[in-house]
Image: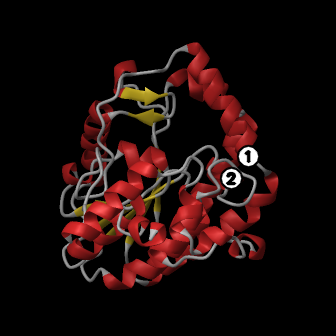
Amino acid sequence: MAELCLANVPNSYSIKRDSLNVLAGDIDTLIVGSSNAYYGIAPDRLQGVAFNLANVNEGPYYTDRLVTAKAPKLPKLKRVIVAVGYITLFSELTRGEIEDWRQYYYAQEWGIPPRSLLDRLDIRMWSRLALAMPPFPMDSLREGFQTLRTGIRPSTIPHLDARGWWCADTASRVGPMMVANALARHHGLMHESYVQDSIGHLDHLLSLLDQRGVDTVLITMPVWHTYADGMRQDTWDRSRAVFQRLAASHRARYLCLLRTPQLSADEFYDPDHLNMRGALHFTALLDAKLGAP
């Protein structure tokens, strides 16, 4: 009963999947990548019909698999915006990493298996109850039971709009301690062992889109200037060179918008994410650069 109830509780992955399917015949721009794009690009402020498929901690493996699966089902697709940044090449959702549980939402909602065989043997591959714990998901069980009783399934969660954008108007937190904590957390996520696979996934993604004649734009999203100052310069130079090379190899574009001086402190949610006001401002700047799809 618990599994049946939880299967009827929406999450960001299931909502994005269902919303994408509803709009599939109209979408001409697809936005993919991690949380900086999920929070920072407002799709309804871009020309045409854009959809934000990005999600938290989404690495190149899942971005590649998602676009590979969905691009052929979007008949009007003309442009894909791929967010890449400081930690993109060095981090992945896999066992032992922060928020490794997210890989099982990709498995359950999108049918994308985890990268490793060991992760594919985890009970969370099929059990929503195991995925929801800890803590015990009493509120979700109530919501799922209500859905079973009424036959009305919730179609949204707070702050997630119909185009896949997380649009919460949060207060700014870009003080020195927040920046130091963010950098320490991200440096802890970064491992050299992921780099070659990450480059391979991005290369495959860009090759696929190039073959389909889709305009592909790699974008590095804005961060607060003190976060950018604290980045390891040699690491960032290496990543940026990879992004530039991949773009040049596949007739794509690379826009490095890491330092966007038009954005103020109160337009950032935290040192490397925009809040709603910042996203609206940044998307307007981005739309001016991109033009119509």
Label 1: how many Cα within 10 Å (few below 14, some 14–19, many 20+)? some
From the image, tell me which residue sits under label 2: 91
Q: Where residue 111 sits in the image (x, y, percent)?
A: 51, 79
Rendered residue at 66%/49% (across/down): 239
For label 2, the SS is: loop
Direction right: furthest residue: 193
Q: The C terminus is located in which quarter?
A: bottom left
Q: Is residue 278 visible?
A: yes
Q: Secondary structure at mark 1?
A: loop
As drawn, the residue found furthest toward the top would be 176
Query: Residue type at mark 2?
Result: Ser
**Residue 249: x percent and y percent?**
57, 70
* CB under 8 Å between discs 2 and 1: yes
**Of marks 2 and 1, which one's residue comes earlier in the chain?**
2
- In the figure, is residue 115 to the left or right of 162? right
Amino acid type at image mark 1: Met
Q: Estimate the x, y position of residue 152 in percent, counting from the top left.
A: 19, 67
Mark 2–mark 1 distance (CA, rounded to whole Å): 5 Å
From the top left corner, tell me how far across and down residue 290 is, in percent.
30, 54
Residue 216 location, quadrant: bottom left
- Which numbered dot is residue 190? 1
Q: Is residue 247 left or right of residue 164?
A: right
